[in-house]
Amino acid sequence: MRVWLLAALCSGLYATQLCAGEIIQHFPANGPVAAMDTRWRIVWGVEQHGGRSEVLYIREAHFQRGPGSPEIQVLGDCRLAEIFVPYNGGTRIYDISNYTFPLITLDPSFLGPVCVGPGVIYDREGVPRPSGPVASEVHDGQLRWINGANKHRRGQSIAVWSVLSAGNYRYIMLYQFRDDGVVSFRLGATAHNLFDSDGDGTTHLHTGWWRLNVVLGAAARTQVSLVELDTSALSSAVTLLGKESRLEWNAERFSRLRVESLVHFNAHSPSHPIGYELIPMRQGNGRYLGVGEEFTQ
């Protein structure tokens, strides 16, 4: 059951807060709503994941591709499901499922300088406050496009983020929604190191394990494919997936997942189904052989 907590309406040039955990952001964000090109509607929540540590999660996110286009739900429930910290010396830490760590309370000092618009801090009910566990900021996205006539366009994005207090660590969990529809999920592990030894046994890795739910209007009316580079033919090899699968990421083959709608198409001629490619930004694979660590393989 979803319970909506009504909050006071507060509209402005940049973002509109309508109800608990809901942010509506049009782009360009420094222009009037009537002149918008695209728009995101983001519904978020704060929850103890599995009754353990708190996470900021996206309940749903909707994208409008133009002023005359319908709003399409892009994401369902998306969240940081686990933070797995393996040490070379054998220590294993699960910061989400083995602890009850809270989100820290943010204040305006955590916000960056006003760029496209001022940052906002929210309480757990989604109401803008002087302090709270969730922040949103609208940023410039640098030069995005330019043509031979030097006609150009800059990009913009909105970031929704929180910080988990986990012992001596602070984990920054951030969701970024760009004006062109791109979505990013990021985890940053930051701390002072507790160990005064540089022995290899204290060397460790912080890995974020995300649960992503790509809806694209209706999740039951999508198709998922594994897309990789075919090095022999120098072309893309697309393998349609008919069921849930465990897939190995191959850096040399640029492995990625493609989720396409079967009912929504773009305005190209000829038209193509709208979709997303899930592209991991990582430097390698961690493979651990302990009991319960099969998910790393």
Image (tube, grey):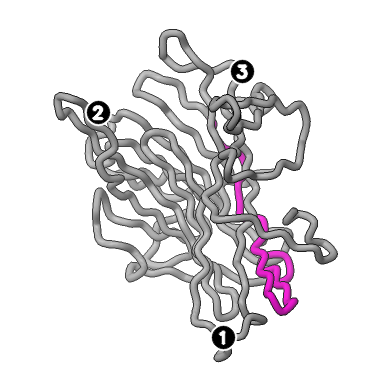
Residue ID at (68%, 26%): 239
- The magenta stretch spans which residues? 73-99
- For residue 262, which numbered disc appears in the image? 3
Kindly report the distance in space between the C-alpha atoms of the residues bearing marks 2 and 3: 30 Å
Quarter of the figure with residue 34: top left
| 236, above or below 57, in the image | above
Marked residue nearer the N-terminal end (2 or 3): 2
Give the residue type that dot 2 points to.
Answer: Ala
At x 59%, y 74%, the residue is 166
Residue 207 is one of the magenta-drawn residues: no
Mark 3: amino acid:
Leu
Q: Secondary structure at mark 2?
A: helix
Closest to the observer, 191 or 296: 296
Residue 265, placed above or below residue 256? above
Q: Earlier in the sequence, mark 2 or mark 1?
A: 2
Neighbour class for label 1 at 10 Å: few (<14), some, many (≥20)? Answer: few
Residue 140 image position (x, y, % from top left): 28, 47
Name the residue at 54% across, 53% down. Answer: 282
Residues at marks 2 and 1, CA–CA distance in whole angstroms: 56 Å
Which residue corresponds to mark 1?
Answer: 198
